[in-house]
Image (cartoon, rainbow, N blue to C red):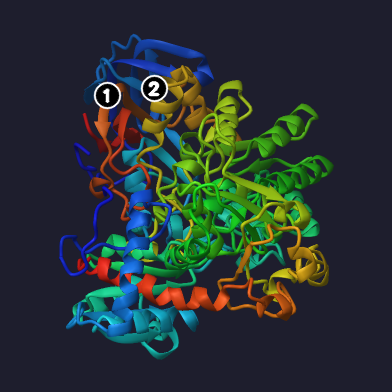
């Protein structure tokens, strides 16, 4: 990757000074804006958009580039506390910055699990060295054991933006009901990793011809769709906001579509790998292709693409799941699930969705920024309207490049996209008006 | 690899691994079968072809016939053998597969014959290790030496593999023997029928080998034993493990009632059909003693043929044939 991360310290308070980004194509779906314009950032906020004549402390030439509100990843594993061999908050957020993300939702399956306000606060302390905003997701139950709810009120007060036991679904109806109720009272969504583990035990890839050929136990489609259907029923009953994580099957997406039509407050995300790859692409026993949910059939991938086109899918989320090399260099069925994704999300979206399918760039910005901000209820983010946070992503939509995981900012390299030729590259990422990634 | 006359000991080949049948060309399969035939007199008189070579038998899973068979094959060619098992080694202490393999390489092993409970373990190891590796069974995936000895045995009784009708009965889902046999037989032009209940023979099994355009699918699935046996030249039974039935809708007793091979049912097959079993065979479950001990059964012959087939595999792996 040309240009390494420039490690600028993120000011925790709103930065001082002003920066003028001149001549870029500003795409901000929240304002229905797609036009060449200048944007002035001052004191950590967006001051002016349009033809700006005011003087600024610094100027940045964005001619030929696209300027958008900063991307927000709804699904990131930063691995801290406790799993620094995989990733740290500093390295994970550096990867986020390199990928154009100005905020990441940090899943709670750390060591210890983020089920206490003290842990939630610790993750956001300046000492962690985060380059972008860290939005902790609180554990839905104590120790993510699915037995007893955590203190939602206290966790939200400490900074939690949602609740999830990601990787360990809330299986019991009673607990899921309680979680939805408590989250609704706290004004945040429940993010459910939908998987009926009774059906997926021992499974390491999607059920189907490829799993059979490789002699690997399969995870059936209905393990995901069945759980989504159950969750939709409970969300309808309670009137809570359900966010379905990493939807991977057409059946689950159909359930979301139907649920929304019948009034359920439901949102969902799809990962770049699920709209790019299918099970038949798995290099035999290459653990860089092992993640959960697994890569599905080509028909399911097509369903993801259609959902991204027609608006059923609200967000692109990475499910960035770094692992240490020694953890992944083992037998396929013994390797942990998960692949990295922060540094390739935009390029895969541009290559596979914009380039190959003609999905407009504005829709991609909605999927990466506008909608994630709305899902989290943050009206001051996901837009470049005056008064919004000065979190900005600048990218070149036509730049062709070759991704090399070893040159990335993440500590981990477990990605099937290593060496891929991609179109669309992040050129700069700004958080609170300050450049945290510079590839200009 | 073009078909050619094979000369044992001519050292005309490079050392090579045998990971699975799926990646082999029909010519390569024929080469292994020819080599096995040439090894028959060698087995009788003994040989020093692999003198000084160290064959490491790395077994993460219990095995009787395969391990002993490889061991005897190596010794018949003058090689030394070392057996490493999961319970009496550093594997128990948590050493990774790749580290174990690298250690055995550093100790001077010339070839590793490995059995492992994880499908694809050999691919994981081979990516990290520049040493010939022979797959003696990986999880539910492949068991190439078994498929080769099965084909060798079939050719002892039948004229050719092309057009041969082979019926596999039993737990195809969990069987590496079934997968390797299906790959091998379809490459050689045989017609394969898989027979059993959906829990053990999923429809996906028929997709293992894509049908060539314009020809009938080389693999078909049937639930009816009678249909499955019709016109069969070879009946191959697969081991049934009682514990696989726990928690499934399928009952063990029902399986035995529907699919056990007895002399009455064998009448559905061709009169000269042979009965094969990769072992270990459980009498009274998938097969009656009456069949197992009948002249139609070639089960012990399979075991015997395993040695010459594995002599050929070892010689080729070490670049000596």
Structural crowding at the residue carrying mark 2, measured as other residues with C-alpha within 10 Å and reported as few (<14), some (14–19) or many (≥20) = many
* Label 1 vs 2, first from the N-terminus: 2
- Residue identified by numbered label 1: A399
Q: Which secondary structure lies at badge 2?
A: strand
Is B101 in front, or is A202? B101
Q: Check contact, mark 1 vs mark 2: CB within 8 A.
A: no
| Mark nearer the viewer, 1 or 2 | 1
Residue A47, numbered label: 2
Is A189 in front, or is B223? B223
**Subunit ID for the residue under disc 1:** A
Q: Is residue B206 above or below residue B87?
A: above
**Subunit ID for the residue under disc 2:** A
Is residue B100 among what the camera can see? no
Q: Position of residue B243 (x, y in %)?
A: 70, 75
Q: Position of residue A134 (x, y in %)?
A: 45, 48
Q: Residue drawn at (40%, 38%), measured in percent from left and top?
A: A102
Q: Quadrant of the C terminus of chain B?
A: bottom left
* Residue A59, quarter of picture: top left
Is residue B32 among what the camera can see? yes
Q: Position of residue A162 (x, y in %)?
A: 60, 48
């Amino acid at each position: 990757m040309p240009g390494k991360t420039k490690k600028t310290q993120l000011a925790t308070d709103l930065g001082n000074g002003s920066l003028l980004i001149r001549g870029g194509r500003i795409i901000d779906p929240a304002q229905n804006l797609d036009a060449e314009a200048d944007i002035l950032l001052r004191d950590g906020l967006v001051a002016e958009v349009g033809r700006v004549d005011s003087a600024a402390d610094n100027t940045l030439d964005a001619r030929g580039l696209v300027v958008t509100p900063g991307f927000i990843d709804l699904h990131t594993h930063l691995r801290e506390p406790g799993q620094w061999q995989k990733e740290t908050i500093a390295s994970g957020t550096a990867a986020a910055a390199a990928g154009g993300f100005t905020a990441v939702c940090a899943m709670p399956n750390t060591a210890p699990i983020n089920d206490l306000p003290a842990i939630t606060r610790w993750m956001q302390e300046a000492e962690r060295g985060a380059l972008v905003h860290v939005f902790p997701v609180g554990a839905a139950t104590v120790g993510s054991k699915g037995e007893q709810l955590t203190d939602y009120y206290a966790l939200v007060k400490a900074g939690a933006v949602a609740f999830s036991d990601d990787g360990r679904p809330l299986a019991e109806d009673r607990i899921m009901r309680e979680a939805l109720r408590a989250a609704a009272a706290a004004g945040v969504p429940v993010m459910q990793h939908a998987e009926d583990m009774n059906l997926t035990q021992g499974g390491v890839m999607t059920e189907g011809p490829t799993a059979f050929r490789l002699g690997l136990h399969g995870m059936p489609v209905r393990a995901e769709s069945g759980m989504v259907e159950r969750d939709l029923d409970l969300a309808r009953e309670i009137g809570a906001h359900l966010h379905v994580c990493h939807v991977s099957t057409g059946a689950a997406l159909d359930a979301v579509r139907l649920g929304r039509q019948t009034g359920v407050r439901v949102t969902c995300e799809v990962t770049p790998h699920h709209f790019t790859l299918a099970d038949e692409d798995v290099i035999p026993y290459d653990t860089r292709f092992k993640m959960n949910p697994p890569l599905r059939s080509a028909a399911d991938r097509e369903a993801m693409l259609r959902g991204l086109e027609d608006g059923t899918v609200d967000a692109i989320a990475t499910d960035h799941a770094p692992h240490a090399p020694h953890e992944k260099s083992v037998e396929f069925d013994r390797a942990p699930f998960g692949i990295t994704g922060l540094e390739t999300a935009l390029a895969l979206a541009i290559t596979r969705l914009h380039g190959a399918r003609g999905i407009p760039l504005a829709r991609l910005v909605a999927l990466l920024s506008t909608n994630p901000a709305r899902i989290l209820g943050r009206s001051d983010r996901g837009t470049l309207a005056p008064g919004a946070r000065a979190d900005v992503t600048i990218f070149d939509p036509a730049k062709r490049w070759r991704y090399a995981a070893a040159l990335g900012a993440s500590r981990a390299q477990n990605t099937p996209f290593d060496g891929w030729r991609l179109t669309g590259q992040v050129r700069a990422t700004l958080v609170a008006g300050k450049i945290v990634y510079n590839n200009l | 690899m073009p078909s050619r006359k094979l000369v044992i000991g001519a050292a005309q080949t490079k050392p090579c691994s045998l990971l699975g049948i799926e990646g082999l060309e029909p010519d390569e399969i024929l080469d292994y079968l020819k080599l096995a035939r040439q090894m028959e007199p060698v087995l009788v008189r003994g040989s020093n072809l692999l003198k000084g070579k160290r064959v490491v038998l790395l077994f993460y899973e219990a095995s009787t016939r395969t391990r002993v068979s490889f061991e005897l094959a190596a010794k018949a060619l003058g090689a030394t053998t070392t057996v490493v098992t999961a319970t009496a080694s550093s594997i128990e202490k948590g050493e990774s597969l790749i580290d174990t393999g690298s250690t055995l390489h550093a100790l001077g092993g010339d070839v590793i014959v490995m059995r492992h409970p994880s499908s694809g373990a050999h691919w994981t190891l081979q990516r990290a290790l520049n040493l010939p590796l022979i797959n003696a069974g990986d999880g539910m995936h492949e068991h190439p030496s078994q498929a080769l000895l099965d084909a060798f045995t079939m050719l002892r009784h039948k004229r050719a593999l092309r057009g041969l009708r082979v019926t596999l009965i039993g737990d195809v889902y969990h069987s590496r023997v079934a997968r390797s046999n299906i790959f091998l037989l379809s490459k050689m032009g045989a017609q394969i029928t898989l027979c059993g209940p959906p829990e053990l023979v999923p429809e996906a099994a028929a997709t293992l080998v894509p049908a060539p355009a314009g020809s009938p699918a080389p693999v078909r699935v049937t639930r009816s034993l009678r249909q499955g046996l019709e016109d069969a030249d070879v009946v191959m039974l697969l081991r049934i493990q009682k514990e696989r039935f726990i928690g499934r809708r399928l009952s063990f007793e029902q399986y035995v009632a529907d699919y056990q091979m007895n002399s009455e049912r064998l009448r559905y097959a061709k009169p000269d059909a042979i009965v094969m079993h990769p072992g270990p065979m459980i009498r009274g479950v998938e097969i009656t003693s009456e069949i197992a001990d009948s002249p139609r059964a070639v089960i012990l012959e399979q075991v015997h043929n395993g040695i010459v087939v594995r002599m050929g595999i070892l010689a080729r792996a070490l670049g000596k044939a």
